Amino acid sequence: MFLPSFQLENKVAVVTGAGRGIGRALAIGLAEAGAQVALLARTEQDIINVAREINSIGAKAYPIVTDVTNRDEVNQSIAKIIETTGTIDILINNAGMNIRSQALDVTDVEWHKIMDTNLKSAFIMSQEVGTFMKKHGTGGKIINISSVAGHVALRTGVVYAATKAAMIQMTKVLALEWGQYGINVNSIGPWYFKTPLTEKLLQDEKYVDDILAVTPLKRIGELEELVGPTVFLASAAGNYITGQTLFVDGGMTIQGF
Ligand SMILES: NC(=O)C1=CN([C@@H]2O[C@H](COP(=O)(O)OP(=O)(O)OC[C@H]3O[C@@H](n4cnc5c(N)ncnc54)[C@H](O)[C@@H]3O)[C@@H](O)[C@H]2O)C=CC1
Ligand SMILES: C[C@H](O)[C@@H]1OC(=O)[C@H](O)[C@@H]1O
């Protein structure tokens, strides 16, 4: 038999920024594939709502209010997950934000806010979960939600782009260091998807025309089109893939002229 399993039965996944947008879609998709899902975000009602959606399909969910830029809160939440479920098999570093401004206008406060939310959170979550996975000896899957902005130049902010490029490189180095522990570290690089982060931008017809002009598939992605690649990398089907970034972008990053 050659077809590996895409199922996540008996796996425990942790999703950061799981209260809305891509994180909510990934959390529900992982649950639909059989995983129990811990939902980390600062917005309590959002993650309670997502937990209810997951429970409604017969799966288990654990909403845990966490500021994932805060190491103490991360440690407390990870301890709670392990105490409740006994393990962590999958980590999705999804939490992120952007302040779209020209480079000359970026303030120190904005720099630290974007760097902490997008990059520091992924690193400290990976460190704490990676420590458990190494000690527990059962390996695991870490998936970083980067962006095409980390691979090609966009007009949506230099600091955001730097965090996403750093995530792509962090993915490679963690994969190199942790492969010996059976931990796969990969990244998903989305182009535009309709979420609260991009809602206003995607209401501007001219902006959407500009997006489609550089998108070979000539459409904005649907959230389920991110869930499939993520479940693939989180499942046994992705067992021999590590250090990679899978751009889910309608072909945008291959667009030349
Ligand atoms: N929507 C898009 O078109 C694209 C999004 N991405 C990336 O996908 C990820 C998710 O983006 P969206 O769902 O669009 O954003 P969103 O703004 O809809 O959701 C972001 C989530 O992260 C949470 N979050 C923010 N700071 C946090 C913190 N300190 N602690 C815990 N949770 C925190 C928010 O509460 C929210 O639940 C981000 O990393 C973003 O950079 C990448 C490419 C395209
Ligand atoms: C594709 C980018 O990641 C996208 O650009 C933005 O303006 C948003 O911040 C999204 O993340």
Image: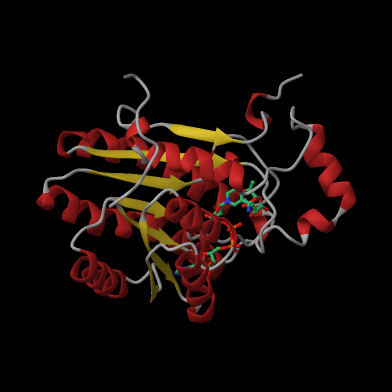
Please state the horizontal and vertical placement of residue 205, each as a whole percent of the image. Answer: 89, 50
Quadrant for the N terminus, please: top left
Q: Is residue 207 left or right of residue 233?
A: right
Q: What colour scheme has been applied to the protein in the rendered image?
A: secondary structure
Residue at image position (68%, 43%) is: 221
Q: Indicate the position of residue 233 as horizontal and vertical percent values.
A: 40, 37
Does 73 appear above or below 23?
Answer: below
Image quadrant in which the C terminus is located:
top right
Most foreground residue, 120 or 67: 67
210 in relation to 115, above or below: above
Q: What residue is at 83 percent from the left and 48 percent from the top?
A: 207
Ligand 1 positioned in quadrant: bottom right
User: How far from the left and from the top, in percent, is residue 169?
Assistant: 40, 38
Q: Is residue 149 visible?
A: no
132 relative to 83, above or below: above
- The x, y position of residue 71, in whole percent, is 29, 69
Q: Is residue 182 left or right of residue 118?
A: left
Q: Is residue 19 in sight in this rendering?
A: yes
The residue at the point 38 percent across, 55 percent down is: 122
- How many marks the image carries: the answer is 0
